[in-house]
Amino acid sequence: MWKWYAVLSALFAALTAILAKTGVKGISGNTATAVRTGVVLLLAWLLVLFSGQMKEVRELNKNNLLFLILSGLATGLSWIFYFKALETGDVSKVAPIDKLSVVFVMILSFVFLHETMDLKTIIGGLLIAAGAIVLVL
């Protein structure tokens, strides 16, 4: 099932890029990020509320909170820089370069989470990196 969720994530990320490029016209990336974040915040809390998972909020421990806060900060910075790139760059170039995050995830998951790297993963990461380099040049 995780593969379907990942495909849906990619589809909505693609829609996000197209909609964001259109939405950022005439405003700053910071304003665009603030509006987008507000919508995501509302959607996420509604999902928790209506799925009956509010009790989990009370079950969060310090470790959960620390890493979720750090993850939120990383997400915020990612969105801020993404919208800054969209302000002046073509979405068809910004979005694929943004996907270098996949390569960074592969490296960081190997180093910090001790996940294994097989040949397919390494080749896939190298192809993604090569594609981003071609776009930059």
Image (tube, rainbow, N blue to C red):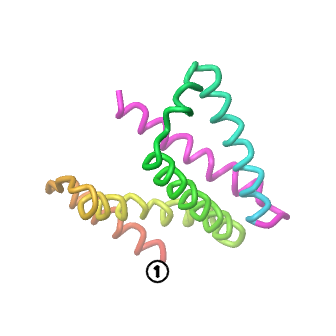
Question: Above or below — where is 119 with respect to 38?
Answer: below
Residue 108 at x, y percent in the picture? 32, 63
Q: Residue at x 49, y 33 (%)?
A: 59
User: Is 96 positioned to the left or the right of 76 in the image?
Assistant: left
Residue 86 at x, y percent in the picture? 66, 65
Q: Residue at x 63, y 35 (%)?
A: 44
Snapshot quadrant of residue 117:
bottom left
Q: Which residue is mark 1?
A: 137
Q: Residue at x 72, y 49 (%)?
A: 36
Numbered disc 1: secondary structure: loop
Snapshot quadrant of residue 79:
bottom right
- Which kind of residue does numbered mark 1 sit on? Leu
- Locate the N terminus and report the quarter of the image it occupies: top left
* Residue extending furthest toward the left: 119
Task: Between residue 78 and residue 6, name the one nearer to us.
Answer: 78
Please tell me whether the stretch drawn in magenta is mainly helix, strand or loop: helix
Residue 67 is a magenta residue: no
Snapshot quadrant of residue 50:
top right
Report the span colored magenta.
1-28
Residue 101 at x, y percent in the picture? 43, 61
Task: Between residue 137 and residue 31, name the one nearer to us.
Answer: 31
